[in-house]
Image (cartoon, grey):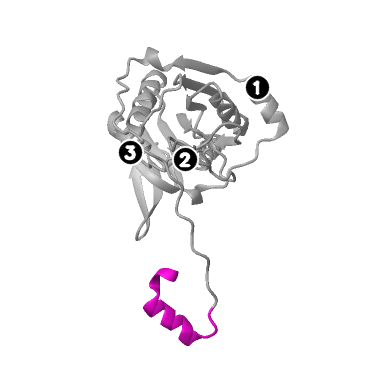
Amino acid sequence: MKALVCVKRVIDYNVKIRVKTDKSGVETENVKMSMNPFDEIAVEEAVKLKEKGVIDEIIVLSIGADTSQETIRTGLAMGGDRGVLVKTNGQEIDPLNVGKIIKSVFDKESPDMVILGKQAIDDDCNQTGQILSSLLDCHQATFASKVEVNDDKTINVTREVDGGLETIKISIPCVITTDLRLNEPRYASLPNIMKAKQKKIDILDINELNIDLKRRVETIEVNEPPERKPGVIVNDVDSLIDKLKNEANVI
C-alpha cells in the first residue's frame, strides 16, 4: 500500500501571533515556522503503519513556497520516503483549491490512502479532508483517534464525535484526517535528518496542473481578539453568587 501524507507549513504553535498593521493577515516575516501539529500526527501514523508492514511507501506532499521544502524534509526525517512540493508562486489557496491540487497529485501517484491533519492551526478551516474525499468520490474517516488496517485491506477507524467515540469501517482508497489523540509524533534523530537531505523531492508548478484556481473565499480583514478583562477576587461565596447574578459579564 502507498500513503500520501499532506503537510502544511504554519507559524509555530509557540509563537505569539501578530496581526499586520493593514489588517490583511498575520506577520510571517522573521517568525519561526514549523509543520502543522495535526499533520505531524498524520506523518507519525503513516510511519507507524509502515513499521507494521501495512504501508510500503510514504509520499509527503506540501503546497506553498520553496520554504515548504523544509517542512517536507521534516516529514522525510520522521520516516517518509520521498516528497512532492506544489509551488503556489505566492498565490493564496483556499480549501477547495487545496483539495483540487491534492486530487491532481493523487491521480498521478495513485496512493491507497491520503492522511492529513483534521485542520491547520493558522486558518482552522477543517475542510480540506472532507472536500478531497468528495472530489475523489472515496470513503473518508475524519477526526481519527485510532486506525487499524485489517487483513482484507479494509480499515477500522475510531472517530472522536460529540457523543463520544464512533468506530467505522472503510475501504481503500480513502481519506483519513487525524485528531490529537491518535498518537504522539516522534522526534527525528540526527542520522534520519541527515538521510532526509538525500531523499528526493519532486517540485511541481501550480500552473502546470491545469486547475481552475478561482478563489471562492476572500479574507476581508484580520483582527486581534479583544483583550480579556482582568479577573476579580471575591471574599466569600455570597459575593461570588451576587456577581454571577448581577454582573455576568465580569467572567
Q: Disc number at residue 179? A: none
Q: Please give the residue where the numbered disc 2 appears in the rendered image.
A: 122
Q: Please give the residue where the numbered disc 1 appears in the rendered image.
A: 197
Q: Please give the residue where the numbered disc 3 appears in the rendered image.
A: 130
Alpha carbon separation for disc pair 3 and 1: 32 Å
Query: In x, y percent, where is residue 35?
Result: 55, 36
Indicate left or right for 100 with 194 as reference.
Answer: left
- Please provide the residue range marked out in magenta: 234-251
Looking at the image, residue 121 lies above or below residue 201: below
Q: Amino acid at mark 3?
A: Gln
Alpha carbon separation for disc pair 3 and 2: 18 Å
Instruction: Tell whether position 88 is magenta.
Output: no
Residue name at image x 33 percent, y 38 percent = 130
Q: Amino acid at mark 1?
A: Lys
Eye-nearest disc, 3 or 2: 2
Q: Residues within 10 Å of mark 1 (few under 14, many from 20)?
A: some
